[in-house]
Image: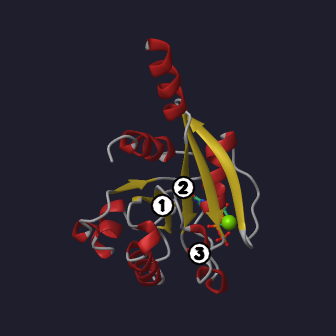
Amino acid sequence: MGLIFAKLWSLFCNQEHKVIIVGLDNAGKTTILYQFLMNEVVHTSPTIGSNVEEIVVKNTHFLMWDIGGQESLRSSWNTYYSNTEFIILVVDSIDRERLSITKEELYRMLAHEDLRKAAVLIFANKQDMKGCMTAAEISTYLTLSSIKDHPWHIQSCCALTGEGLCQGLEWMTSRIGVR
Ligand SMILES: Nc1nc2c(ncn2[C@@H]2O[C@H](COP(=O)(O)OP(=O)(O)OP(=O)(O)O)[C@@H](O)[C@H]2O)c(=O)[nH]1
Ligand SMILES: [Mg+2]
């Protein structure tokens, strides 16, 4: 009985959790994905389509889809939505002009049937840039406190140094098994 339980438990623990990494072009999504994977900064060019990698954090397996954020690609984000457990929304904290577009995209995603069970991690990226918005400012602008039907968390980070990324992943692992 104990052995069966242990096997079931290990199956459960090794289950893969689907994550989509979204956000406007130039937000730093691909840089974040490869920091997760290799702990280093890779040279990126704008993503056309997507990159997918498996990231393992403390025995938890995440299958992460990094999706291109250019305007022409955003209408196809929804083809990645089914079975998504986590949305990572990456915000370029220096890009004040386009935060309203990020907000539109966020609420469009949250209203989508395929994402109704997804939790949302917002990375306020590029915190190394002088004059950038803080996570609190971004949270207020995006009216995150009004989101009641999805668990959410905002984390400031810098993908170039990796600062803040682990805390974001820790929040994700802490959500597993809650729902
Ligand atoms: N200063 C600074 N630059 C960053 C940071 N994160 C990413 N970048 C830079 O921002 C640029 C865009 O990064 P990408 O990771 O390619 O952006 P993306 O969100 O994947 O863009 P698309 O694939 O076009 O959607 C690159 O030059 C990165 O080096 C950061 O935290 N700080
Ligand atoms: Mg990219």
The residue tagged 3 is: 77
Callout 3: SS = helix
Where residue 107 sits: x, y (%)?
38, 78
User: What crowding class fits label 3: few (fewer than 14 Cα within 10 Å), some (14-19), or many (20 or more)?
Assistant: some
Looking at the picture, which amino acid does disc 1 mark?
Answer: Ile
Q: Determine which of the numbered discs, if any, sits on residue 19 in the image.
A: 2
Q: Is residue 45 above or below residue 71?
A: above
Asked whether mark 3 and ligand 1 are closer than 8 Å, the reply comes as no
Looking at the picture, which amino acid does disc 2 mark?
Answer: Val
Where residue 158 sits: x, y (%)?
53, 53
Tell me the CA gap for discs 3 and 1: 11 Å
Query: Residue furthest toward the top?
Result: 2
Q: Quadrant of residue 5?
A: top left
Q: Determine which of the numbered discs, if any, sits on residue 72 in the image.
A: none
User: What crowding class fits label 2: few (fewer than 14 Cα within 10 Å), some (14-19), or many (20 or more)?
Assistant: many
The residue tagged 1 is: 87
Depth order, front residue of 22/91: 22
Looking at the picture, which amino acid does disc 3 mark?
Answer: Trp
